Image: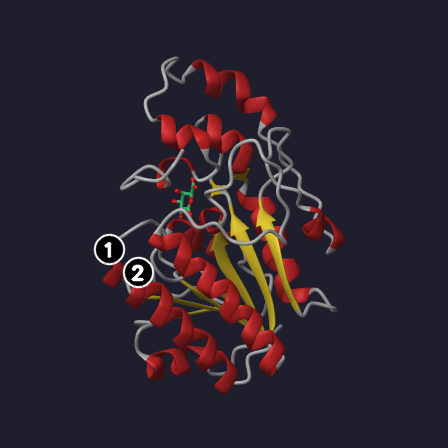
Amino acid sequence: MQRVLITGAAGGIGRRLREDMRGLYPSLRLSDQAPLEPAREGEEVMQADLTDLRACETICEGVDGIVHLGGQSVEADWDTILQANIVGCYNLFEAARRQGVQRIVFASTNHVIGFYRRPTRIDHTVPPRPDSRYGVSKAFGEALGRFYADKYGLRVLAIRIGHFAERPVDRRRLSIWISPRDFLQLVRIGLEHPDLHYEIVYGVSENDRTWWDNANAYRLGYRPQDESEPFAAEVLAAEPADVADPIAELFQGGPFCSPEFTGDP
Ligand code: 15L
């Protein structure tokens, strides 16, 4: 890996990853639609709109591996999702193929499987049950990754990120939290694992309260260093006793499940 591109580098995960990946590879190229902090030594900064295929080709030029964080990261109206996560994601994969990029780490989300009930334990092989248009778009990204791996030999790791943060902030996040350093470990597996073809893993730390069997990540060498349980007492004490959103409480995707919900709980 000589040059690694991070898309969505101005976002929350992107800004943290920029710091954590500094110096890991000879060159880090940072891209976003939004303005970025100026490049430092070993960095390049390129503003780009992923809905523009030519702009995608430009940012992919001379790149060996991509961490694709760019796009819409929460629920939105269909047109926003369509442009950012369907058109933008397709352009990025296609530009990567045209430019001979070897690997893509795709930032997927737990909202691909958000309508599985708590506390059902699921692994990476279960059929998607998206809880939002956003979750549907990330399931599309996972399928696109599989297609580019099988058809064109791109090596792809899809990480179904739980909640990326310094610390877990509520009861649900005690189950799905991932620390920045554990996330970095998964990203490096995606960029460096010698036998990667296409895999899905859960982006989650070693949480006692997890709903996910992350054996596939462990098989690839993931050894999380953090766990949510030491935060549990404090987090639960701060949580209101009454259940404000009963639909959210039923499902793994939590508050992404309840808006517009007219289904059968
Ligand atoms: C996500 O996919 C979002 O990007 C993030 O902002 C969180 O809301 C997270 O899921 C979550 O489920 O907590």
Q: Position of residue 141 (x, y in %)?
A: 46, 65
Give, as a three-letter code, the residue at label 2.
Ile
Give coordinates of residue 61: x percent, y percent.
Answer: 46, 83
Q: Amino acid at mark 1?
A: Asp
The one nearer the camera, 192 or 119, is 119
Residue that mark 2 sits on: 81
* Circle 1 SS class: loop
Circle 1 Cα neighbour tier, 10 Å, few/some/many (<14 / 14–19 / ≥20): few
Q: Is residue 42 left or right of residue 255?
A: right
**Viewed as shown, does residue 147 lie left or right of 10?**
right
Number of other residues with Cα within 10 Å of mark 2, as a class: few under 14, some 14 to 19, many 20 or more: many
Ligand 1 rendered quadrant: top left
Question: Is residue 46 visible to us here?
Answer: no
Residue 115 point in image, percent of width and height: 46, 42
Where, quadrant-wise, is the C terminus in this rendering? top left
Quadrant in which the N terminus is drawn: bottom right
Q: Residue furthest bottom?
A: 98
Q: Is residue 98 above or below residue 143?
A: below
Q: Helix, strand, or loop for circle 2?
A: helix
Q: Locate residue 21, reporting x and y percent.
A: 54, 57
Say whether marks 1 and 2 touch (CB < 8 Å). Answer: yes
Which residue, given by chain and number where applicable, does mark 1 sit on? 77
**Residues under labels 1 and 2: Cα distance?**
6 Å
